[in-house]
Image (cartoon, grey):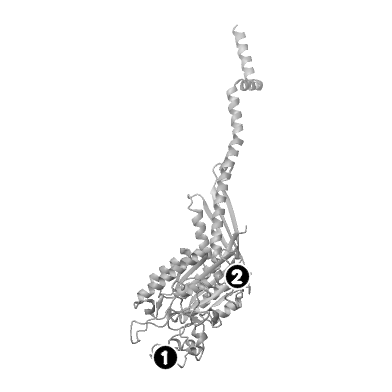
Amino acid sequence: MAREQQMRTIMKRLRASHPLGTLRRCLQDRAGVSAVLVALMMIPIVGSVGLAIDSSVGFILKSRLSKSLDAAALAGGRVALSDNAEEIARQYFDANFGPTDGTVSLDDFHFELDESKEFVTLTAQATTPTYFMRIFGKDSMTVNGRTVIQRQTTGMELALVMDITGSMRGSKFAAMKQASQDLVDIIFGDRSEIENLWVSLVPYVASVNIGPSRTNWLATNDEVLKKPSRFDPEGWRGCVMARANPFDTDDTPPATQPFTSYRYPKTSDTEDNNYPPVKSEATADNNARGPNLACGAPIMGLTASKSAIDGALDAMLVSARGGTTSNLGLSWGWRTLSPRWRGLWGGTTPATHPLDYHTENMEKVVVILTDGENQFHDNNKMSNPPYSDFTAYGRLDDLGTTNPKEGRKILDNRMSGTCTAMKSAGIRIYTITFGSGVGSSTQALFSSCATEPSMYFHAPSNEELRSVFHTIAGELANLRIYQ
């Protein structure tokens, strides 16, 4: 029995060690089989889920990058010709891309303006860590973005309203002319004319010159028509008086409300305007005299010719005496753009212009600059102060006050009304104060006159003025996403 028992034990051990026996046991253990199969099946499932999650992270980052590049490209494109265009683009990119959590990194940002200055290209690259793909040895993923915008000059009627008072004399005047020329060069590029681009030029002092040929805008009994000898020996240069309020602030055409010619009165006081003989302001400055004293360069109506604009800017001179009436300059800028004046300007302006407000693909824009406050030039040497030089409003007391501050307030209020009416009509207004002599009240007036706060600029120096005009020129471009 003992021997038989020993043989059964040996056979049992042999069966247990056979490979078939091992397989049989595995098949009999169903729980173990399920665990192995589930483990094998989970490998592709986990990989797919991980890939989907990491892909979603990459997609979100890509979208974030693209939107930020679009915003940056549009912002940079508006000022593409200024020296800090890339800096502005980067600021917009950072503001839209937002802060990172310390894991996402921005590896590259590049701003490029092509040689034609027509296309702006922005590219960026960002890296983010993976969450599941690192199982397969991929610890991070890189995302790239690219945006191209095309700068196109939109159809536009543009009025440049420039202060040419005596305080602008010297380097300031040269800087203003150069900055204005830069703007014209930028919007025209290398072309002499651009379809649907029209520019007017409105120089102003204490009066505005409509040009001596426009006598049909004067009242029928005006002395230019009835007593022209009063303007001897040089004749009427073309300046007009301000119409009675509210017509001094609006765009009512002359057929409804005609103008009166401007003639600086002849006086016996040599400190005011003793003539003859006539002394031209171009050579005599504040010692000038004559019936056209404080009558500046004439308005140039809308023209499509770059050479005509260049010529008018080049011929523009500083005008002495009188003071500053930015409100009248702005009103005349409006009249060069108002459809109520269509067909009246003649010369370089066709009978079809100015166009209607809100004409498709056309904008109406005014850029107005001053280096000082609205004021009547005080003449303290006159025999009965307080007094002032003669202006389009007459003397200071013709406004109903002998207080210069009250006179300034009256003109400021009238300018504010003109600004509001122009903006309501659909005209975009850029305003600029220039130099260190502009007080806080005038800066506030010009800031509130601008269509948007960002469309007001204060340029303390000649260099900053040129930068301002470059910025405005860039913003006058119509931008669209190209790629």
Q: In front here: 444 or 147?
A: 444
Residue farthest along the top direction in this orientation: 1
Question: What amino acid is at disc 2?
Answer: Leu
Nearer to us in this view, 352 or 185 = 352
Q: Secondary structure at mark 2?
A: strand
Q: Under tag 1, what secondary structure?
A: loop
Q: Position of residue 40 (x, y in %)?
A: 61, 32
Q: Residue at x 49, y 85 (%)?
A: 223
Q: What is the number of the mark on residue 197?
A: 2
User: Label for residue 187?
Assistant: none
Q: Is residue 329 left or right of residue 150?
A: left
The quarter of the image holding the N terminus is top right
Do the CB atoms of the residues marked 2 and 1 lie less than 8 Å apart? no
Location of residue 323 (image quadrant): bottom left
On the image, numbered disc 1 is attached to which residue?
A: 274
Q: Quadrant of residue 414?
A: bottom left
Residue type highlighted by circle 1 = Asn
Please name whichever residue, 84 or 445, is drawn nearer the observer in this view of the structure.
Answer: 445
Give percent across and percent down for residue 350: 62, 74
